[in-house]
Image (cartoon, rainbow, N blue to C red):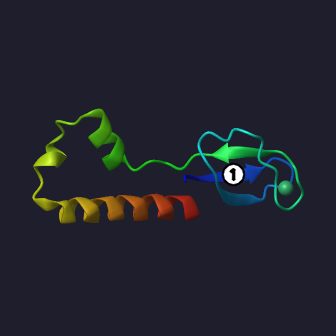
Amino acid sequence: MPTYDRACNACGHAFEIRRPMSDSSPVKCPKCSGETRQLFKKVPAIFTRNIDHPDSPLDDMPGAEKMRKQADMAINKVMKDMNS
Ligand SMILES: [Zn+2]
């Protein structure tokens, strides 16, 4: 089940919910029952690049281990950006 980041429009409370993709009912704020909006995380460039350009030079890298390391680094960078 996918996890969604949401933020309350009324009190600003940010939280995560887990629910089926088919469920499109409104999500209420757990704190004040206010209306919430969807937050979109920045997707690390490495992922979009692979999806958009399957022929990307990244595919030539030796092994999935290096790939995962790069992905980790990209995620860490995004997290750092978000916290700063
Ligand atoms: Zn709220």
Residue 15, image x and y in percent? 70, 60
Q: Is residue 5 left or right of residue 53?
A: right
Does residue 60 appear to the left or right of 77 in the view shown?
left
* Residue drawn at (14%, 43%) of the image: 57
> Quick check: can you spot residue 18?
yes
Can residue 84 be seen here? The reply is no
Q: Residue at x 24, y 34 (%)?
A: 53
CA neighbours of label 1 inside 10 A, class few (<14), some (14 to 19), many (20+): many
Locate the C terminus by quadrant. Answer: bottom right
Which one is in front, 46 or 29?
Answer: 29
Which residue, given by chain and number where applicable, does mark 1 sit on? 6
Image coordinates of residue 68 in percent, x first then y, are 27, 62
Relative to 25, 73 lies left or right: left
Give the residue at x 78% y 59%: 13
Q: Within 8 Å of ligand 1, the CB of disc 1?
A: no
Q: Where 24 falls versus 4 (above or below)? A: above
Query: Which amino acid type is marked by label 1?
Result: Arg
Q: Which is more toward the observer, 48 or 19?
A: 19
Q: Which image quarter holds the N terminus?
A: bottom right
Question: From the viewer's perspective, is residue 44 above or below residue 73?
Answer: above
Compared across the picture, whether 20 is left or right of 29 comes to left
Residue in the picture at 20% in, 66% down: 65
Q: Secondary structure at mark 1?
A: strand
* Ligand 1 in which quarter: bottom right
In the depicted structure, whether residue 65 falls above or below residue 11: below
Residue 26: horizontal and vertical position, in percent? 78, 41
